[in-house]
Amino acid sequence: MPSEIRLAFEHPSARADATAPDGPLDRISLRDHIVEVEIGAFQAERGTTQRICFNVVVEVRPLRDPIDDDVDRILSYDRVTEAISAELADERLNLLETLAERIAERILLEPQAVRAFIRIEKLDRGPGALGVEVVRSINDLKTMPVSTHSDITPHPHLVYLTNAAIHSTNLMQWLDQLQARAEPVILCVGQSSAISPKTGHKMTQRRVDLLAIEQNAWVLAGRDDRCVVVNTRTELDWAMKNGQISVWAPSKIVLDAVDGPSVGPNDPVALAAWFAGHIEASDLLLIGETPPANSPVPVLIQDIGHAGL
């Protein structure tokens, strides 16, 4: 086997050695770190965990001053395992490639880190290990997407609209007032009054009911061009930073959440309250609806007959 092909499948430590840049660099490594997690794009991978193996090598700048046996002066192994844990806890992912990219980005934010080799393998999806490897350096950071774990976290104003509120003559005035607010605005809705199909199966019914909410979100979007339907956290983050009024389509975020809601789409007000806590909203305004039993954020009530918010 040619040495280039052999090297491509070697452990990241061997690949780091073979592709080392000019000048000495120290390395720290994490070998065969196995975590059970729910991940994967296939339906068979939802609702169940599988073993994922991580092998990580980080090249670091050598310290010029004495270490003095002080753990605070070095890039600790804990920072590597914490990067893995943080990205696994952030949201449920479909692709190992996405996870590897995010772990590499988080590690490279460490002051000493220069280059990171991230190999991730699924151990339970076949007779062997199925995986990916990425190699990223600090020079790649400027071309990476904006991190979703930025220190600047917006706290949006979440608004739940009943079906009567969606079709109210006051809707345009409410949107005018919401658009004038300083904080970002996200709108939530429930299912339309139309009867949804019944599947007789809990998991598939959950999907159908979530889609029914999304259909109603598009109905709201049709009432005013300022209302833009979004279904990913990346889209929401962009909208919040750019003054766009978003209408939440819940399927992806609900299904991908590590700490998903205990309520279903048949209780849309409670689902909106969960979402408010999930995105750290400043408050939850209910237009034409009664408050849920529990809410992680303050709840405000608006009578549907009043045009002023």
Image (cartoon, grey):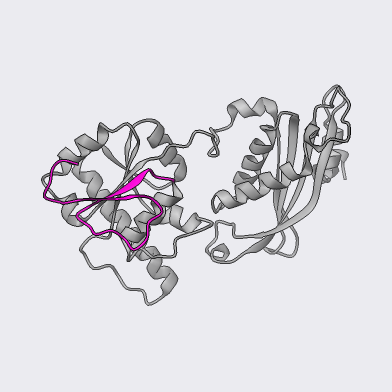
- The residue under the point 44% across, 61% down is 261
Q: Position of residue 121 (x, y in %)?
A: 71, 54
Horizontal and vertical percent position of residue 184: 35, 36
Q: Quadrant of residue 92?
A: bottom right
Q: Please report the residue visible at 58 percent of the width from the left and 31 percent of the height from the top.
A: 144
Indicate yes or no whether the magenta region holds residue 175.
no
Residue furthest out toward the bottom: 200
As drawn, 96 above or below 4: below
Q: Look at the image and tell me in which quarter the N terminus lies.
A: top right
Assign the magenta stretch its main secondary structure. loop
Q: Position of residue 80 (x, y in %)?
A: 73, 43
Residue 287 appears left or right of 17: left
Q: Quadrant of the C terminus?
A: top left
| Nearer-the-camera pick, 55 or 149 | 149
Disc tally is: 0
Is residue 293 a member of the stretch shown in magenta? yes
Reply above or below: 118 against 25: below
Q: Residue at x 88, y 31 (%)?
A: 68
Q: Is residue 43 above or below residue 219?
A: below
Q: Residue at x 62, y 64 (%)?
A: 49
Give how far across and how far down residue 52 sits, in percent.
Answer: 69, 57
Q: Foreground: 249 or 297?
A: 297
Query: Image quarter for residue 127?
Result: bottom right
Quarter of the image for residue 101 reads top right
Magenta segment range? 280-309
188, above or below 61, in the image: below
- Relative to the observer, which residue lies in front, 238 or 18? 238
